[in-house]
Amino acid sequence: MIPRSFDEIKEALINGDITLPHLVERYLEQIEKNRFLNIYVEVWGEEAISRAHELQNKYDEDKNSVGPLFGMIVSIKDVICYKNHTVTGGSKILSGFKSIYSSTAVIRLLEADAIIIGSTNCDEFAMGSTNETSFYGVVRNAVNPDLVPGGSSGGAAVSVQTNTCLVALGSDTGGSVRQPAAFCGIHGFKPTYGRISRHGLLAYGSSFDQIGILAHNIKDIAVTLSVIAGPDEYDSTALTSVPEDYEDKLLAPKNARIAYFKAALEHPSLDKTVRDRCNTMIENLLAKGYSVEGVDFEYLDFMIPAYYVLTTAEASSNLSRYDGIRFGYRSPNATNLEETYKLSRTEGFGREVKRRILLGTFVLSSGYYDAFYGKAQKARRLIVEKTAEIFKNFDFILMPSAPGPAWPIGESLDDPIAMYLADIFTVHANLTGIPAVSVPVKPTEEGLPLGIQFFADKEKESSLLAFVNTL
Ligand code: GLN
């Protein structure tokens, strides 16, 4: 068994119970065993082993010379650039494309002596909640291979769930780290917007996108965040405040005040078991001496329309760069420039991505701009203001991660609206830019994983992580 926490792995390496190359080999065996789940787009096994030898030698020569992530094996979602490695956003239009630079997150991981083992499958350009829109096919949930793993970071979640790596980097535009974490029984964390540089993250909705972290426990999230967070001259939206040592700060907070939205726990889409788990969580928090209070929040049903209008608008602009000329796939059927654009995009993008580009172009078009895009911006502003008001009186907000557990593969493809609606509890954190984490709770009677989220005010990730670490 490979240990499921970084502390245990470090201990095994320090005691000499295992060497780093041997550890990598064991992860690679896990990857082989779980091939049928379709977790990875590419596995960089040989490279990982040779890096493990280098790092082990460095450690053997001088134990103090290695970085803080020595011994950590990480997977990266197929939307995160790693120089000279394939990155496709789960799309045919980028098939065969290799990154020409590394994302800031990857550079910082490597500088801290982590090993990157491969790129994980995801919904095409991170658009989806089930990992079914990937050009590489669906990822299967290890709890039951007939079920989706959630999305869009489905491969990332299953990569951790099946112990093929210790920690996964995903991206979260509207819940893509937290919802698959909930569906797979692990922890998923999205920091404050701007906490982790977006340099080298393929853009979906730029004012929403954040790199997030999936792991078995909060401590491993904190260690990873401490390394990859922080200002970056390549991302003007990155926060300029210097991040803290999140691992150091994992001290139980006292007297935290927690709010929940009555409208969320009474929402008709909410599965009874999830409601029960939320109520149990509230009882446990009260028993621990925290104050917990239901608050009114009148904008819950505006979340999904605002999110889907704004993100598709941003996506229609962001994805215009995939023109058949500059990156990846070019249609062999084109005979002139216009056909090159049209056919490359027609053949290169999948159905869901096309639907969103069309929707986004429509809501931005003159004549409809005010009615849709402008209105959604106003709704976003109201949601931001109301949320800030709540944080004047509360430290954290409790929220279900998803209305229910993972559903069967194939079920949502014919009904995209139903799939969009299932994002109701996650998009709030992206509309407002606040940090959020999904923690696993008791599974359903059938054994399906469930999660509950906690939100904190902007830049309050250290108290958020410390708080959920006590649950
Ligand atoms: N399910 C949401 C969507 O499809 C969230 C995706 C994400 O966070 N990347 O847009």
Image (cartoon, helix red, strand yellow):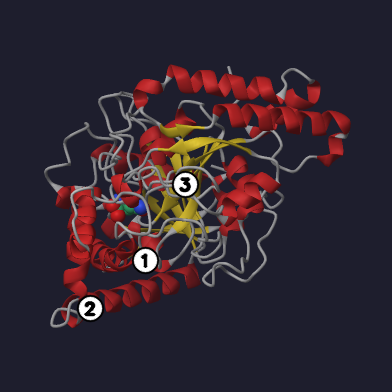
| Mark 3 nearby-residue class (10 Å; few <14, some 14–19, many ≥20) | some
- Which residue position is annotated with label 2? 375
Q: Which of marks 3 and 1 is nearer the N terminus?
A: 3
| 371 sits left or right of 247 in the view | left
- Counting from the top left corner in percent of width and height, residue 189 is at 49, 49
| Mark 2 nearby-residue class (10 Å; few <14, some 14–19, many ≥20) | some
Q: Residue at 57% of width from left, 33% of height from top? A: 166
Q: Residue at 22% of width from left, 78% of height from top? A: 375
Residue 40 visible, this angle = yes
Q: Residue at 88% of width from left, 34% of height from top? A: 62
Q: Which of marks 2 and 1 is nearer the N terminus?
A: 2
Question: Residue type at mark 3?
Answer: Lys
- Which residue position is annotated with label 3? 98
Look at the picture and state if 464 lies above or below 411: below
Secondary structure beneath dot 1 equals: helix
- Which residue position is annotated with label 1? 431
Cβ at disc 3 under 8 Å from ligand 1: no
Which residue appears farthest toward the front when viewing the image?
Answer: 335
| 424 sits left or right of 218 in the view | left
Question: Residue type at mark 2?
Answer: Lys
Question: Residue type at mark 1?
Answer: Leu
| 47 sits left or right of 128 in the view | right
Which residue appears farthest toward the right when viewing the image?
Answer: 62
Secondary structure beneath dot 2 equals: helix
The residue closer to the viewer here, 383 or 231, is: 231
Cβ at disc 2 under 8 Å from ligand 1: no
The residue closer to the viewer here, 290 or 379, is: 379
Residue 4 visible, this angle = no
Q: How far apart are marks 2 and 3 (CA)?
A: 39 Å
Q: How far apart are marks 3 and 1 (CA)?
A: 31 Å
